[in-house]
Structures are given as C-alpha cells and as structure tokens.
Image (cartoon, rainbow, N blue to C red):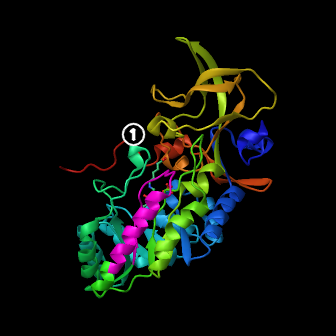
Amino acid sequence: MGAGVLGFDPALLRAIGERVGTPAYVYSANLIRAQYHALDDALKDIRHRICYSVKANGNIGVLRVLKQLGAGADIVSVGELRRALLGGFDPDAVVFSGVGKTPVELDEAIRAGVGFLNIESAAELEAVIAAAKRVGKPARVGIRVNPDVATETHPYTKTGEKTAKFGVPYDEVVAVAKRISAEPLLKLRGLAMHIGSQITEVEPYHRGTVKLVELVAGLKASGIDSLEALDVGGGLGVRYHNEKAPTPKQFAAAVIPPVKAAGLGLLCEPGRYLVANAGVLLTKVLYRKHSGGKEYVIVDAGMTDFVRPSHYNAHHEIVPLRDGKREEQLVNVVGPICESGDFLALDRRLPMVEPGELLAVLGTGAYGFVMSSTYNQRPRPPEVLVEGDRYYVARQRESLEDLLRGETAEPTTWYQA
Ligand code: LLP
C-alpha cells in the first residue's frame, strides 16, 4: 500500500494526521528538490533561471526550499511579492506578470527592484511609465507576448491563444518595445510567454519560443538590442493519473535551441511541475452512507479545502493510509459542504474504507491550499513541511476567531452616503 503514496512514508503521514488533525496539507521538501534538480540539469546547456510560480503554492516554507536551490520567483500580485521577499528571493530574480496590475502594485514592484516587470498591454505600459516617474526609480521590464499558440489543456487554463486576455498582441509587440526604448526610466530586458497550464506536449513550447525569437529579430532591426533573456513561461504538465507528462529533457530540447540561436538566456516559470506531486491532502473518513444506489464515503475535506476535482473535474488519486488488503468498491468520496459539486472523487474504485481512517489525496501540492476558501465558515487547513523524517507546521490551521477578524456585531463608524 505504501508504494501508492508516491514518495511519502504512510506511517509518517499517519503520525502527522494524528498530531495536527485533518484535513491537512503535507509537502515533502525532498520531492520538491528532486523535481527542481531534474529540470535544472536538463537546462544546463544554456544560461537559465527557473522562476518558481508562487501562485501554485505560496507557503513560505516551500518558497524557502526553492530559494535555497537557486530558483527565482514568478508572481502575479503584490501579495505574492511580499511572500517571495519573505521567502528570501532576490527581487532581481522575480518576474511579475498579470493583466491587471494596479498602480499600487506597480509602485511596490518598482520600489522593490523586481527584475522583470512583464507588461501585458499598451495601456499598462503607460501605467508603468507613470509609476516609474512617481517612484523615481528605473523599471526593468519585459513584454509578455501573446504568441497565438494553442495547447491541449482544460479550457480554463489555456492562455496562449489570440483570443485570450493575456499578453501584448503579437503584431503590437514591436511598437510597444519602441515606446519602452524611448523612455529613459524603462529598460526592456526580455520577452515572455505563458501558453497555458498542465500542458502535456512540448511542441507548443517550441512553436511559441520560435515566435519570440522572430520578434527578437524584428526588435534588432528597429535598433533595440537590450534584451537579455526569453521567458518561456510555466505550464509543464505532471502525471496525476494516466497523463503522459513531458520529461524535463523533452521540454529542454523544445526550448533551448531557438533561445540559444538568439544568443539570449532562458527563463521559465514552472509551478505545478515543482510542487504538485510533492504534496498530499490528509483527510479522515467521517461516515459511510448508501443512497440512491450510490456508495458514499463522507470525509472531512471538501471543495473548500481542495477545489480542483469540482472546479476542473480533475482526477486525484486517493490512497488509504491503513495497511492490509481489502475488497474494492465503487464509491463517491464527498466532503461536508452543502453543494452537490462538493466531491473529491466520483465513481472511484477504492478499498473498503471505514470511518475514522485516514486517506491521502495525491498530487495536491499545487493549486491546493492556495485555492482554498472559508465557504460554509470552515477554517482553512494547516500546511506541514516534511524534511526527511522530521516535519514542522509551516502554517497553522485557521481558527474560528481568524474567520471573524475584521467583522463586528456592533457598527462603530457610520458614513454618510
Ligand atoms: N506563469 C504564469 C504567467 C502563469 O499564469 C502561471 C499559471 C504559471 C506561470 C505557472 O503555471 P504552472 O507551471 O503551474 O502550470 N488553478 C489551475 C492552474 C492555473 C494556472 C494559472 N497560471 C489548476 O489548478 O490547474
């Protein structure tokens, strides 16, 4: 049975579940390191930096593990910037993308000295120029390009097609670059793309990278040669169930040759690849129930703790942590939330599990805790980081008091409309 928990010791997980309670997220520092090393090694033939996408898992303990390996960070908000800096990342190694950065966010990014402030529209460029003037500091920028490259992934996580809201339209990039070059406070350091998430083929990366390289030639022809790197984005798919995830070597073979030919360094922004399979969600079976011809296993984690199954119909393996062979059964694993969409697995073949026992939901290290909510007034679960045979609580379970913070039963200040 232990082999099913992919790199985690089931006895350790049981001990964690008993000490910190359930539901609880558990991450393995060593599994994160192994993923990082495999990618770093595959990219060794080119000057590169792996900028971990903080949105996948922003726990400061996780950030510190990646920072110590030499990673940079990819962020999308000032909240993530704060986390990245607390995690110890050098601002110079931070890439900041996002279509809707506010003036406050632009000011803070420029003040902090973010290395690549990625501009996603001509309108945002004007806001960046204004921010640099306000702050009185140079802004080091990139252009996030919309490369118009399609990928086969969930519609919610496609980002590289012409119709997507992301990036500067391909045919506007040269004009935007010229405007940047004319602005003394701005320095154009790179072109970037991010074509989607959970991508299981490398060919779109190649096509997109080639399109970035073609733009580099166009920029040179316009006298712009300040570029240092091309950022090929994140999105590398992982194996959750039966997907065929690309290997780091296949990814490297798709992106290195064009970037090398352009004589530039390479940046990438993986999130899921680094942390998804380094995390599990521990949950306890509360009840069993037979209803309408269905077998229900009711557990103490729901869509508020882990939304991927109900939001994307994502498949995550569920493994009992108790030893021993048992008969299998077709079940729906559901949570306590008052929504029929609240499930972790439907029509899943599982050993006959019993109330009180612990289950591990696999592949939950990315887009797990960060997408949790407090709907139904449920405190969010703790996050535990495992280092070898030791662990620590990297984030405490939220309390009911935490959920009431900022609210009052008695208004103290009234405003006249
Ligand atoms: N860079 C940018 C600009 C991004 O928008 C993202 C993810 C990444 C990098 C990292 O992508 P990754 O390597 O993790 O695929 N909540 C969804 C995934 C949304 C991804 C959003 N952007 C899920 O649970 O599948």
Quarter occupied by residue 272: bottom right
Residue 69 or residue 111, whichever sits in front: 69
Residue 157 spot, x, y in % from top left? 42, 49
Horizontal arrangement in the rendering, residue 200 relative to residue 104 (left or right): right
Q: Is mark 1 within 8 Å of ligand 1?
A: no
Residue 163 location in percent, x, y? 28, 53
238 shown above or below 353: below
Q: Position of residue 401 (x, y in %)?
A: 53, 43
Q: Choose between 376 and 265: the one closer to the eye.
A: 265
Locate residue 175 relative to residue 102 in the image: left or right: left
Query: Pointer 1: what residue?
Result: 409
Region rendered in magenta: 190-217
Q: Is residue 158 left or right of residue 121?
A: right
Q: What is the three-letter code of the residue carrying label 1?
A: Ala
Report the quarter where the N terminus lies: top right
Residue 307 can be seen, yes or no: no
- In the image, taking residue 196 as reference, residue 353 lies left or right, namely right
- Please name the residue shown 70% across and 43% down the image: 20
As for residue 212 lying within the magenta part, the answer is yes
Relative to 403, say whether 65 is above or below: below
